[in-house]
Amino acid sequence: MKRKKVLIIRFSSMGDVILSLPVASAIKQNNSDTVVDFVTRLEYAPIFDQFPAVDTTFAFDGNMRLLLKELKKQKYDTIIDLQKNPRSFIVTAAVNPKVVVSYPKRRLRRELIIRRPKLKLKIGHTVDAYLAALKRLKVEPVSRRPRVELEEDIVKYGDDFVNNAGFTGKIIGLCPGSKHYEKRWLRYQELAEMLVVDGDKNVIVFSGPNEEFDHNLNISSEKLVAAHNIRIDRVGGLMSKCDLIVTNDSGLMHLAVALSVPVVAIFGPTHPSLGFAPLGDNDRVICDNIDCSPCSLHGEKKCRMIQKYCFEKISPQRVKEEVESILYENSPSKIL
């Protein structure tokens, strides 16, 4: 009997790609014999090597003709389009499966949240929107939370990195970057300085290839090391060794959640109400809910105020206190 074949499409961005993982999990657990493949951008493809629910990952490197050639060979029964843009429409038309399902983008409601922030409307989580695509397939969701299982070589990479750094005690990961500059809380250096002089705490600073800040946050300390421009699966290996991650609203926030590492997530021009809050059991969101936030969906628009009020009262000391609350009090998830 021929196995059913499903292709899930989500090219970008990293956070959305990770938040689509529960869709693949639900299909596989509903029928383990179903072939579940995924197409995404090249830089995110290594994530799926650490995710057993996906059989084959097709990495898009900009060559659409080559990608379509490979996908046509697979003869998919179903496409789940979690991107819903011209590129995903081209893939769907070329593959021509029997069934195509997608998800509710909720564009108008998101626009209302941004244009009328004082109303403080909510839209539901993006994971729930993705899982809604399964209704037509009569597949029941298994879990809302994305989960990544690291392979042995990636775990070893993390172990070797920490051992070479000579760390003992707690390890705090700091993620000062994000795709859009406006989402970046700019006081990570001050936070790191507080952490490295505080007894049992060590710091790993994560940064990508195009980050403008110093990879060591201009700090020279044996208790702080930089993890700069490393492959995304290896980032996961390092994050898994952290006791906690402090991050902006970014893809690395969702990766930490998928690794079951607690996060303190700092939201400013974006807002949890737009559907991207972390889903971990012991996570914290620091967000001051000011009248002008959110001002954009992804933080792509420049602040129109005379100063950035959404970050104004989020001090390094306040963030450090939340870090310690999670590390030492084991307190539950909440939005602050």
Image (tube, rainbow, N blue to C red):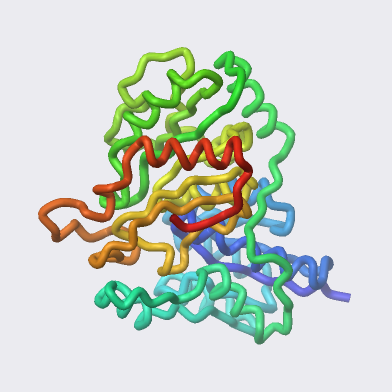
Residue at the (66%, 25%) spot, across then down: 159
Residue at the (66%, 34%) spot, across then down: 154
Q: Looking at this view, is 98 or 36 the one in front?
A: 36
Q: Looking at this view, is 240 or 29 the one in front?
A: 240
The answer to which quarter of the image holds residue 20 is bottom right
Left or right placement of residue 273 versus residue 182 in this view:
right
The answer to which quarter of the image holds residue 28 is bottom right
Left or right placement of residue 13 versus residue 98 in this view:
left
Q: Is residue 25 above or below residue 114?
A: above
Q: Residue 128 appears at what percent x and percent y?
A: 57, 73
Residue at the (63%, 46%) spot, across then down: 259
Would residue 70 be visible to someone looking at this image?
A: no
Tally of numbered discs: 0
The quarter of the rendered structure image containing the N terminus is bottom right
Q: Residue 299 appears at what percent x and percent y?
A: 30, 58
Left or right placement of residue 155 versus residue 266 in this view:
right
Q: Residue 112 appears at what percent x and percent y?
A: 31, 80
The answer to which quarter of the image holds residue 114 is bottom left
Residue at the (48%, 42%) spot, across then down: 322
Would residue 32 be visible to someone looking at this image?
A: yes
Residue extending farthest left? 306
Q: Looking at this view, is 259 or 10 the one in front?
A: 259
Q: Residue 179 appears at what percent x and percent y?
A: 35, 50
The quarter of the rendered structure image containing the C terminus is bottom left
Left or right placement of residue 30 versus residue 69 in this view:
right
Residue extending farthest front? 329
Q: Is residue 54 above or below residue 133?
A: above
Q: Looking at this view, is 299 or 314 the one in front?
A: 314
